[in-house]
Image (spheres, rainbow, N blue to C red):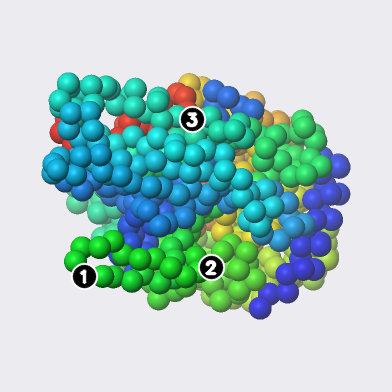
């Protein structure tokens, strides 16, 4: 068991001091064996971003039910009854567990059980409504903020939705009617949506064939829907107690939140003959959870996936059983020519630093920066044992403890060496240009967001689905930003993994991260760079930055206002219409 309390105390003092001074991929779609058999409770994705048209709010989206066929009648997909769907928010590293929990429960009725149609003559079967509760004391008590909230039906087709023999409405009107403002001030939408995640599932699971080497890539989630819980919450509601109403800087540590979602079922289900509904009883048991995309399926091996799903992030951080999969990720094996790189030709541009600065080897099983442990070189940096060195340099043979492990488990502080190489003078351990602070060391896998970072306008030519990767590129190479090491907003600093926007190409970003892009950003360049040369933009770096899976955007454009999600595909529609 990891000793956690001293770490939290050090982390809190760190935040106070610096706050004053300044397997393969798909995103949790059937990601573990047990939850694959329970799709109504299966998290698919979590998003958290500062609302582009209302920057005083944060939009959080938790999606469930993978790969919904739009024409999946007669029993169309719906949120499940007897399931607790929850969105968890952590905003204070000094307090164990969640500070805020939003809980959603759903009820279904059949208005006309005499028909096999889902909608007929203005009446609806499988008609769902929801209750939203909120806890602000870590789940000890809940207050009901919405009761009887409307869930739009499946987007079956024009006769069911628009015609006089159906609902006599439009689907956009149904979405608008379903958007509710709670008594707590949150705007809420619960209902069907186009699946906003985009990835070539077929290529990726064909042993890493992305981009496909033998034909065009294809979005495996195109024309599929999910069920979304979307909430737009005032930043003031999400701030930890005592935080200033206005941030001290665009990287204010007081403005960092961690977001994760879960689904829970009762421990016991009793089945009866005669068609009676099952009886659920007993304790509530978490059966699915999700924070960072791709964590369970891209990092955790199949034999541990159900175990990972059963933990909370707080359990995970105190349980070091899973750490080894982040220290030496399987995917890195396929980006290393000395191991199995040649077996996955699609990943050829993605290569791990094996001889960075002719000194550091980040290949699986190697020591990374561990050779510097306890030396004068790391004094005063996050790698110092007096700060976080006991966690970031835990031992030999754990090379990715300095980049992948904190990205998934604690977030990244605005503290050396985790600053851009701009201004470092060739020393990756020196202070550089700040570009991220989403450090919240209170739990394991969560989507961490610094709410103080400004929004990148979606119509800005600099907006990029490459998220923080693109922000780093601009900070290192664009004269607008790389002539100073001072803190300033760089477009896409609000992108993944600082939160997650709907547009962010997380598959590409995480593959680039496994390939050492974060290490390169702080000055640990690729092997074809000779230490001391003035230009680190080598073919190795360019290959990683130019890599693409072949699927770069969603199959439908996102909306400009809440809930931002694209309208769900209808059962009679294809993208060719």
Query: For mark 1, what is the residue?
Result: 273
Q: Are marks 3 and 2 in contact (CB under 8 Å)?
A: no
- Residue 312 in view (yes/no): yes
Q: CA distance from mark 1 to mark 2?
A: 34 Å
Q: Is residue 14 above or below residue 326?
A: above
Q: Dot 1: within a 10 Å radius of its alpha carbon, few (fewer than 14), some, or many (20 or more) residues?
A: few
Pick the residue in front: 396 or 81.
81
Q: CA distance from mark 3 to mark 1?
A: 40 Å
Secondary element at image label 2: loop
Residue 366, quarter of picture: bottom right
Query: For mark 2, what is the residue?
Result: 311
Query: For mark 3, what is the residue?
Result: 180
Residue 115, quarter of picture: top left
At a point 66% along the width and 57% down the height, the residue shown is 140
Pick the residue in front: 399 or 301.
301
**Which of labels 3 and 2 is toward the front?**
3
Q: Dot 2: within a 10 Å radius of its alpha carbon, few (fewer than 14), some, or many (20 or more) residues?
A: some
263 sits left or right of 433 in the view: left
């Amino acid at each position: 068991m990891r000793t956690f309390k001293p770490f939290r105390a050090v982390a809190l003092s760190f935040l106070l001091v610096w706050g004053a001074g300044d397997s393969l991929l798909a995103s949790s779609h059937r990601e573990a064996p047990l939850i694959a058999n329970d799709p109504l409770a299966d998290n698919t994705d979590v998003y958290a971003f500062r609302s582009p048209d209302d920057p005083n709010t944060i939009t959080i989206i938790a999606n469930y039910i993978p790969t919904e066929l739009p024409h999946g009648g007669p029993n169309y997909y719906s949120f499940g009854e007897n399931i607790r769907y929850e969105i968890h928010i952590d905003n204070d590293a000094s307090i164990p567990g969640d500070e805020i929990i939003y809980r959603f429960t759903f009820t279904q009725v059949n208005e006309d059980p005499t028909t096999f149609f889902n909608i007929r003559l203005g009446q609806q079967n499988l008609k769902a409504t929801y209750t939203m509760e909120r806890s602000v004391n870590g789940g000890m008590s809940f207050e009901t903020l919405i009761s009887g909230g409307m869930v739009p039906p499946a987007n079956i087709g024009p006769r069911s939705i628009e015609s006089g023999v159906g609902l006599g409405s439009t689907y956009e009107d149904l979405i608008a009617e379903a958007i509710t403002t709670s008594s707590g001030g949150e705007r809420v939408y619960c209902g069907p949506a186009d699946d906003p995640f985009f990835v070539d599932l077929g290529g990726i699971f064909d042993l890493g064939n992305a981009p496909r080497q033998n034909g065009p890539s294809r979005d495996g989630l195109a024309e599929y829907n999910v069920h979304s819980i979307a909430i737009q919450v005032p930043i003031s509601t999400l701030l930890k107690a005592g935080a200033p109403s206005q941030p001290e800087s665009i990287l204010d540590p007081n403005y960092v939140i961690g977001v994760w979602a879960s689904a829970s079922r009762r421990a016991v289900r009793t089945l009866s003959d005669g068609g009676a509904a099952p009886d659920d009883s007993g304790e509530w048991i978490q059966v699915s959870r999700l924070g960072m995309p791709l964590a369970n399926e891209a990092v955790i091996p199949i034999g541990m996936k159900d175990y990972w799903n059963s933990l909370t992030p707080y359990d995970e951080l105190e349980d070091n059983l899973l750490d080894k999969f982040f220290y030496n990720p399987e995917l890195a094996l396929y980006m290393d020519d000395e191991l199995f790189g040649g077996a996955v030709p699609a990943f050829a541009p993605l290569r791990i630093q094996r001889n960075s600065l002719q000194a550091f080897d980040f290949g699986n099983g190697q020591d990374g920066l561990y050779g510097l442990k306890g030396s004068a070189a790391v004094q005063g940096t996050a790698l110092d044992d007096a700060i976080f060195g006991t966690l970031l340099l835990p031992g030999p043979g754990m090379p990715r403890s300095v980049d992948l492990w904190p990205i998934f488990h604690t977030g990244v502080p605005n503290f050396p060496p985790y600053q851009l190489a701009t201004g470092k003078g060739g020393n990756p351990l020196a202070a550089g240009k700040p570009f991220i602070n989403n450090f919240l060391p209170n739990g394991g896998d969560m989507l961490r967001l610094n709410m103080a970072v400004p929004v990148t306008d979606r119509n800005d030519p600099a907006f990029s689905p490459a998220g923080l990767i693109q922000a780093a590129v601009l900070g290192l190479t664009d004269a607008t930003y790389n002539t100073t090491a001072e803190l300033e907003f760089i477009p896409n600093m609000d992108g993944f993994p600082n939160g997650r926007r709907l547009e962010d190409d997380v598959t590409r970003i995480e593959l680039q991260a496994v390939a050492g892009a974060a290490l390169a950003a702080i000055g640990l360049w690729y092997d074809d760079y000779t230490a001391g040369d003035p230009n680190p933009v080598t073919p190795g770096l360019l290959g990683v930055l130019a890599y693409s899976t072949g699927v770069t955007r969603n199959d439908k454009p996102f909306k400009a206002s809440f809930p931002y999600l694209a309208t769900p595909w209808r059962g009679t529609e294809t993208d060719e219409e």
